[in-house]
Image (tube, rainbow, N blue to C red):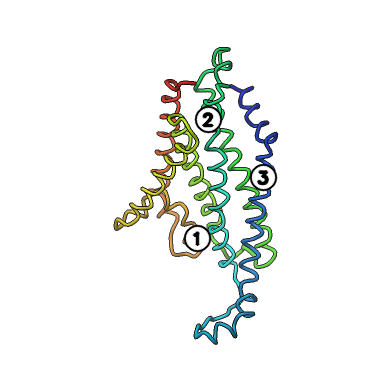
Amino acid sequence: MIPFLKKEILEQFRRKRVLLLGILFAAFALLGVATAKLMPAIMEMFADELAASGMVYDIKESTIMDAWTQFFKNASIPLIVVIILWSGSFTGEYQKHTLIPLVTKGLSRTGIFVSKMITAVLVWTAGYALYLGIFYGYAEFYWGNGTVKHIGLAVTLYWLYGVWLLAMLGLFSAIAETTMQVLLGVGGVFFLVTFLELVPKLPAKLPTALTGGLSLLQGSAKPSDFTMPVVIVLICIVLCLAGGVVLIQKKKL
């Protein structure tokens, strides 16, 4: 499995995925800081037009909390790109029948599945760490992060949310024949969870609750409030990975 894992990691560099995602994560980190820093100046430029149209906008200096609001808003877009890029990781191999020689030479299907999932999580982790590092550095320079509590937990929750989506991606990749089927499967679960947020008291227990790290920074939520969704997400990740390992044994390569 180790040589196959190395091959998968090197392939991300050869296909320029690492470069593409690095640029994307860095760009959105800078965009988040720039948006928070420049928004008061932009609104001031349009103050007369807003007043003429009857709109009243209270222009205030940007704060560190404005910056972290942008952090969590912007993080979803690079994550979606990661999901899209990885949606064809398995199905592309099925369609080209490139896994057959590896299996006939002794590589287990479990090794194939685990290697691809490790690579996906590593790429997501590296991109997210770059995103966080750039953002944190600029936020520290302009506002200072000293007054913000639970930053480590808040950003870790969002990282775990991304791992949950990748685990679902792996599960559907072990079933589906095409990239579109994989995306439809992941999208279907996501929209189902979003729909369940309409049920009273249920949103705080759903996986999407992990995207609410901003409430920790603002002090409107406590770390203990995320215990249940973290437990549920960890169980879902284990079940998805275990299901993927079982299902890929019966998959036609």
Kind of residue sitting beneath label 2:
Phe
Q: Position of residue 158 (x, y in %)?
A: 51, 50
Kind of residue sitting beneath label 3:
Leu
| Residue that numbered label 3 is attached to | 20
| Residue that numbered label 2 is attached to | 90
- In this orientation, which residue lies closer to the viewer: 129 or 35? 35
| Residue that numbered label 1 is attached to | 214
Q: Is residue 13 above or below residue 253?
A: below
Q: Earlier in the sequence, mark 3 or mark 1?
A: 3
Kind of residue sitting beneath label 1:
Leu
- Name the mark on residue 119: none
Count of numbered labels shown in the rendering: 3
Marks 3/1: CA–CA distance: 27 Å
Q: Position of residue 52 (x, y in %)?
A: 54, 87
- The quadrant of the picture occupied by the N terminus is top right
Give yes or no for contact between labels 1 and 2 (Cβ–Cβ under 8 Å): no
Local packing at callout 1 (Cα closer than 10 Å; few below 14, some 14-19, many 20+) is many
Local packing at callout 3 (Cα closer than 10 Å; few below 14, some 14-19, many 20+) is few
Q: Residue at x 62, y 53 (%)?
A: 132
